[in-house]
Amino acid sequence: MILPVRRSLALTARRGCRQLNLAPKILRTSTQRRVSVASYSTTPVRRLDAFHTQLEGSNSAVLSSLKTTPQTPQTLTEKIVQRYSVGLAPGKKVKAGDYVTLSPYHCMTHDNSWPVAMKFMSIGASKIHDNRQVVMTLDHDVQNKSESNLKKYRQIEEFAKKHGVDFYPAGRGIGHQIMVEEGYAWPGTVTVASDSHSNMYGGVGCLGTPMVRTDAASIWATGRTWWQIPPVAKVTFTGLLPPGVTGKDVIVALCGLFNNDEVLNHAIEFTGTEETMRTIPVDDRLTIANMTTEWGALSGLFPIDSVLQSWLRARATIVAMGLEVGSSGQFTHEKIDDLLQNQLTADPGATYAKSLYLNLSTLSPFVAGPNSVKIATPLKDLEAQNIKLDKAYLVSCTNSRASDIASAAQVFRDRAKDGVIPKIADGVKFYLAAASLIEQKVAEDVGDWQVLLDAGAEPLPSGCGPCIGLGTGLLEPGENGISASNRNFKGRMGSTDAKAYLASPEVVAASALQGKIAGPGWYQKPEGVEKVIIGEGNGDHVHDKAVSIEEALDRLIAEAEGVIAKAEQDILGGAAQETAAAEETLTEILPGFPEKVEGEIVFCDADNINTDGIYPGKYTYQDNVSVDKMAEVCMENYDKGFGAVAHAGDILVSGFNFGCGSSREQAATAILAKKIPLVVAGSFGNIFSRNSINNALMGVEVPRLVQRLRETFKADKTGEKVLTRRTGWKFVWDVRRSKVTVTEGEGGETWSQKVGELPPNVQEIIARGGLEKWVKHQISAN
């Protein structure tokens, strides 16, 4: 039991605002401006000389060629990165697009800690550079009691103890929740993890972003890794969050209403007036930031404001009174004082790549799915469809904190008769797992946990479990499930023939109670609200109008320049072409690296093919999967027929946002196991781009090719879309000339276009077999 004073403080910190509401890159073509990793950029090429600075003792940390504007206003993201970049030139102000060498405040690994340790040892490292920087948690496969998994867990614990690393065993909680409640994810810092939902740390004003296993090994060995600052998008909230609407509804609506890759590979900064932001408590901010991953972003950062300050003070008070919160000792009033005295905010006039807004007052409860976060439907519309439910889940780091459990319990309390808690509907299974033991104990002490057990919920150990498709309670073929977790990709939570929906904890609980997708009836529609108000800009129509006029002028200038350029081409004709050819720049090709990569195109005609589709989650934490098995299961969650259609040496082409989702490196290595050397897409998820470079898989973005393939191959004779198709088209990537050439079948049209340069330093990483082997070579050479 926790003491009454702790109970009061805990509920104040966790549930206050919600109670109030209830009561009242891979290579880009030359036509695109967005920037990803070095080898995949099309803006004027900057030679990436930062990789070798991951080695301890190196003096140069960033591109020496980068220039600076001393008084350039910075976004909050840029300011935080500035603090955690090493080796910057004197006076250098970092900005979006810059490559930096980062020394993160903390780096967390979970069940993948042992594979990271194996990489760490294989590169010749023997001592962790800074053991206070590293945190290890066991959370993904905690229900697995097989000897092989228990052995891996023992190895991780022994490794952590040997190196003096903070370690949290299986059952203690989900790593991201531990990072927040133990204070490792501290406001104003950069904290990374080898997991795609590191974005969650943005809910407490910490710039959280995912790294991959190879990056984690580099951080262990050197304390540093490379990063390119993404373009920064500003998302402004206006209005007030209505009663019965939660942070989950906010992010589900954002994912579903802005569903055309508006924030793909961006860093997001959330902002709004103090009145607006006060309606979004920290727990809801964590939910929103967590699922910016599903929205396609690399981070989701909330401001260090009065709401966060109150949350920090409450936790520090609990610690000061001797009431246990955690063991890391991060929460002290002195540390908070220092944070506020050196508080970071975005500069007036800071440059944002884009601005979006959402009027919270117009928002109602939303549900995502089935099987996609890009499909968001108002709850009332799904309620009218009477969608039968088989399983419900209140699990994951997204929405299983004490405040979420309280909301779910309240649904059952509201329906109690004579003090008897009602049971969940016949035929429905309801699974419950807290985000951490600390959150579970708070829920137990106030009685919320027991309410859900009395209703028939089946408790699971604190961990990822069903969210990632591991352990008890997975969806069977033909079943419908609704979850408060973050990701409902086809096959992630069980069978590829099941349907998964995402919703808030109260909607999940109400659905379990009624046996169909339903809400608790808490939402109170504001008078005059007929639709969700969203748009580009800040939601301030006077300001946005001024900006739109400026943008219109920019477009007119660009159009005029285009007309002039076309006229010059028409007048000069061949002479202009000869001049362009003469000015063509050639990329240096390292000895042994192929000047050209070519093959037949195999087309997987879909956008948003995620890492679960590329490499099924059930294999992700099996460390002994053979290369042949990886090749066999490659793309099977997307198309079970892929393995029979695709052959070694083919060029895999897909749609937009390929490789979105989790940080698993196997999404890249499984494609390599299939002996496919190159992936082409309209666009890539950034973390897949990073994994590709780190694991020696080449990639290039050619949106025009995707468009041409879709125009040519629309459907088969029955009218059904072919998931994987041999096209007979030939693709050639001329690395030296940074140009791709496509021949559209025998006797078909041949066309070419420029793409970004693959610089020699990235060629070297790929030629060495990936970043791990490159670092090993560098260590041995020194």
Image (cartoon, rainbow, N blue to C red):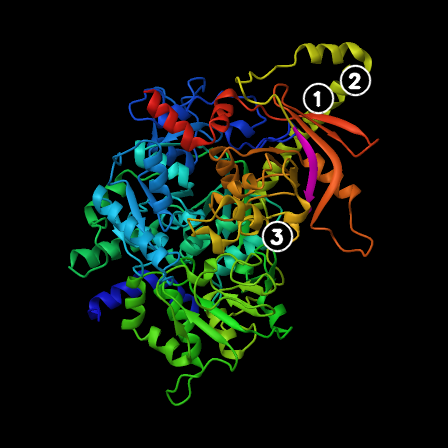
Which residue is disc 1 drawn over? 561
Residue 262: x %, y % from top left? 58, 43
163 displayed left or right of 434: left
Q: Nearer the viewer, mark 3 or mark 1?
A: 3
Identified at 53% across, 27% down, the residue is: 39
Between 491 and 121, the residue placed more toward the observer is 121
Tell me the number on the disc at residue 567.
2
- Real-space Cα distance between discs 3 and 1? 44 Å
**Residue 267 horizontal side relative to residue 125, left or right:** right
Pointer 3 local density, CA inside 10 Å: few below 14, some 14–19, many at least 20: many
* Cβ–Cβ under 8 Å for marks 3 and 2: no
Label 3's element? loop
In the image, 590: left or right of 639? left
Question: Which amino acid, mark 2?
Answer: Ala
Q: Is residue 257 above or below residue 441?
A: above
Which stretch is magenta?
A: 598-606
The answer to which quarter of the image holds residue 705 is: top right
Of residue 103 and residue 217, the one placed in the foreground of this image is: 217
**Residue 693 lies in the magenta stretch:** no
Which mark, residue 340?
A: none
Q: Does residue 760 lie above or below 579 as drawn?
A: below
Q: Position of residue 587 (x, y in %)?
A: 58, 17
User: Label 3: which residue?
Assistant: 638
Crowd rating for badge 1 (residues with CA inside 10 Å; few <14, some 14–19, many 20+): few
Q: Is residue 603 magenta?
A: yes
Give how far across and how far down residue 452 sits, in percent: 39, 76
Disc 3 vs disc 1: Cβ atoms closer than 8 Å? no
Asked whether residue 87 appears in the rendered view, the answer is no
Mark 1 is on which residue type?
Glu
Q: Amino acid at mark 3?
A: Tyr
